[in-house]
């Protein structure tokens, strides 16, 4: 090659390098190259130094010449995984991450890089980096605004669905609950409650039987965003407990953490009272208001199923002696009055907590929980004394009494069916012994 041609090539190479230097100095953002395998920073330009407001020596010392340390600690695992995923399919990567500046300020970086192999056989990333901190702040503010708008939209949807309801707005971080209620004139008033849930003020107003349910719903709503419904009893400022149905929604913030809950609670006390009335009608004997046969069996079975083997419960089977003669001699009207008389005396002899039911006709059952042999015998003797009487009508009279059979959980039976059979067997013994007495299952009579 002629000497003049070599000189021309040198001149063009110098000119190209000058243009590249000008481009590196004036291009927006910064440039970095680093070893793809070791992470060691090979080159940085003035634009990158400008982003961090320092010289090259300070930058290299601050990040210890390592791209891994250039990325903020909290983002390193994510960025490493993203790079590995992208270079499986492409020779370039695009990332956004945080970097910690020399003044401990957080700088958001937009990172676009291409993977190349240099003349020494090293895999090198050639990166163009931009400071997007302000852009990120605007995006975060926009996201927060959108989240707030969504929450408010959902909140007012709930309000529109039930204008007369009690409205709740809970700030999770501040543990502050805003409550809105209408007064008697229809004017809505807001009240703030500090220390609402973590401070225990709300839980203190919930009926003790509903506490576990409400706590469970609250903790669940804190874990995952979503909507739900819960029913509970609550007392406002010492008033009587009322039933409420709360429709609620919880929302998470930008850090995937629940930051707010809103809800609308409807007073359903009348609805619950009606449900209780219907349930009572379905469970009660129409003549005596005692539990009917089906309800008695279900309640007894449930109570025994949850009892400990060492508990002592007494099951009484009670039969009205000579009841057929009352009906045949004095008429069914007097027979009905006799059934009511027996039922009332059974109710008075036993405790309010005991289960008392009419099993049909002139037969009754009582489950006396947490008792003793002597107490059960005492109740049986008292009942015999109370029922023993003479029923009169239309110049005729019929003596009545009651026969009682008693069996004990868990000695005589560990479930309802076995305990019922034992008590019924004891009742048969009482009848065979002349009536107007009681017998204990398995106990010999002296």
Image: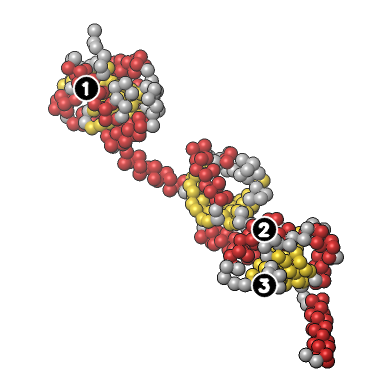
Measure how far apart labels 1 and 2 are at the Cα level. Answer: 78 Å
> Relative to the observer, which residue lies in front, 216 or 153?
216
Circle 3 residues within 10 Å: few <14, some 14–19, many ≥20 = some
- Quadrant into which the N terminus falls: bottom right
Left or right relative to 18: residue 203: left
Q: Which residue is mark 2?
A: 76
> Relative to the observer, which residue lies in front, 51 or 22?
22
Residue 83: assigned label: none
> Relative to the observer, which residue lies in front, 354 or 133?
133
Q: Among all residues in the image, which is located at the extreme left?
A: 328
Left or right relative to 166: residue 375: left
Question: Can residue 348 be spotted in the picture?
Answer: no
Percent from the top left, x then y, of residue 263?
55, 54
- Quadrant into which the C terminus falls: top left
Q: How is the image coloured?
A: secondary structure
Give me the residue at 52% from left, 44% from top: 216
> 104 above or below 129?
above
Whether label 1 touches label 2, CB < 8 Å: no
Give me the residue at 49% from left, 49% from top: 230
Circle 1 residues within 10 Å: few <14, some 14–19, many ≥20 = some
Give me the residue at 51% from left, 40% from top: 212
Q: Which residue is mark 1?
A: 425
Give me the residue at 18% from left, 22% from top: 322
Q: Which residue is mark 3?
A: 116
């Amino acid at each position: 090659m002629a000497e003049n041609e070599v000189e021309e090539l040198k001149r063009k190479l110098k000119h190209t390098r000058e243009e590249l230097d000008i481009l590196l100095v004036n291009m927006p953002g910064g440039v970095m190259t680093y070893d793809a395998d070791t992470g060691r920073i090979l080159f940085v330009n003035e634009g990158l130094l400008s982003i961090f407001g320092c010289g090259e020596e300070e930058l290299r010392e601050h990040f210890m010449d390592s791209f891994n340390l250039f990325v903020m600690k909290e983002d390193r695992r994510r960025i490493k995984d993203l790079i590995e995923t992208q270079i499986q399919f492409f020779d370039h990567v695009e990332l956004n991450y945080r970097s910690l500046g020399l003044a401990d300020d957080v700088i958001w970086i937009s990172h676009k890089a291409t993977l190349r192999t240099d003349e020494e056989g090293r895999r090198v990333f050639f990166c163009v980096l931009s400071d997007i901190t302000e852009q990120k702040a605007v995006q975060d503010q926009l996201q927060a605004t959108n989240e707030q708008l969504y929450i408010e939209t959902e909140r007012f949807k709930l309000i529109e669905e039930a204008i007369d309801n009690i409205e709740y707005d809970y700030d999770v971080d501040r543990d502050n609950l805003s409550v809105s209620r209408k007064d008697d004139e229809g004017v809505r008033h807001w009240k703030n409650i500090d220390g609402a849930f973590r401070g225990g003020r709300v839980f203190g107003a919930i009926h003790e039987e509903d506490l576990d349910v409400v706590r469970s719903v609250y903790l669940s709503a804190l874990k995952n965003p979503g909507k739900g419904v819960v029913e509970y009893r609550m007392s406002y400022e010492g008033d009587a407990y009322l039933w409420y149905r709360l429709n609620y929604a919880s929302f998470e913030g930008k850090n995937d953490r629940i930051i707010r809950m809103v809800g609308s609670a409807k007073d359903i006390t009348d609805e619950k009272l009606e449900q209780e009335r219907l349930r009572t009608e379905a469970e009660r004997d129409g003549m005596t208001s005692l539990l009917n046969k089906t309800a008695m069996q279900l309640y007894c079975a449930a109570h025994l199923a949850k009892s400990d083997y060492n508990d002592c419960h007494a099951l009484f089977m009670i039969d009205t002696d000579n009841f057929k003669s009352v009906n045949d001699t004095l008429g069914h009207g007097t027979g009905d009055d006799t059934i009511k008389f027996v039922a009332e005396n059974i109710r008075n002899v036993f405790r309010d907590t005991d289960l008392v039911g009419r099993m049909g006709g002139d037969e009754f059952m009582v489950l006396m929980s947490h008792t003793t042999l002597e107490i059960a015998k005492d109740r049986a003797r008292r009942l015999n004394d109370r029922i023993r009487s003479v029923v009169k009508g239309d110049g005729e009279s019929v003596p009545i009494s009651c026969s009682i059979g008693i069996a004990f959980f868990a000695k005589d039976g560990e479930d309802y069916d076995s305990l019922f059979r034992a008590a019924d067997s004891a009742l048969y013994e009482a009848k065979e012994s002349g009536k107007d007495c009681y017998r204990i299952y398995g106990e010999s009579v002296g």
